[in-house]
Amino acid sequence: MQGNNRIKTIVGGASNVLTMQCTLISPVDGFHPVFTLDKITEFLYKHLDEYGDSREDITQCLKYALDPGTQGKGFIVVGHIDDKIVSAVVINETGMSGYIPENILVYVAVDGKYRGKGYGKTVMEYAIKLCKGDIALHVEKDNPARFLYEKLGFTNPYLEMRLKR
């Protein structure tokens, strides 16, 4: 399932074209030789800003998605310019359907220098195409990314409640 998708994104006018490539990292192939567990973890930890989790939680999520020992339950799409990660999406499969969506979008992040230029939308659209079944995500009401999710067709039919122990 690992693959590449070259996408030209115009940044700063037609004379300044940056090409972002999307690389799919799947359980079949495991972690990428350039986009390693540590590199993706650090990117997400840094660029999720106040909406992020601890490094340990991010690492656990990535391992869940890709660990061949547990038959990997998801995938990662890394948007990059050369070897520099500029965006990333992590999807985990829930193993359910109908009453719970088949997929949960756990993380999406874009490097602050590249926000508002279409990189997040591009990796999201690529990841959505790869999903089989419905997709859920959790977003805080004040997260500006919420508007991107709505443009991509996500709706908010429920109020989530949690009991923390």
Image (cartoon, grey):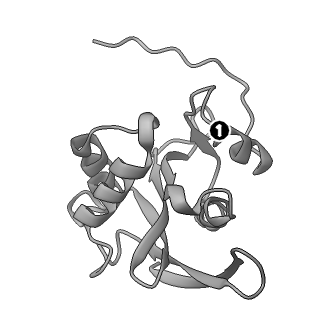
Q: Which percent across, then down, holds residue 86?
A: 49, 67
- Residue 101 in percent (x, y) is at 59, 41
Q: Nearer the viewer, residue 61 or 21?
A: 21
Residue beneath label 1, please? 144
Up/down of 42 relative to 77, above or below: above
Q: Residues within 10 Å of mark 1 (few under 14, many from 20)?
A: few
Residue 159, percent from left and from top: 63, 17
- Examine the rendered structure and indicate whether residue 109 appears above or below residue 100: below
> Which residue is pictured at 59% across the width and 40% down the height?
136
Position of residue 158 in the picture relative to residue 32 (left or right): right
Which of the 4 image quarters holds residue 5?
Answer: bottom right
Total labels: the figure holds 1
Q: Amino acid at mark 1?
A: Pro
Instruction: Determine the residue positioned at 68% across, 64% down.
Output: 117
**Numbered disc 1: secondary structure:** loop
* Relative horizontal placement of residue 127, taking residue 121 as reference (left or right): left
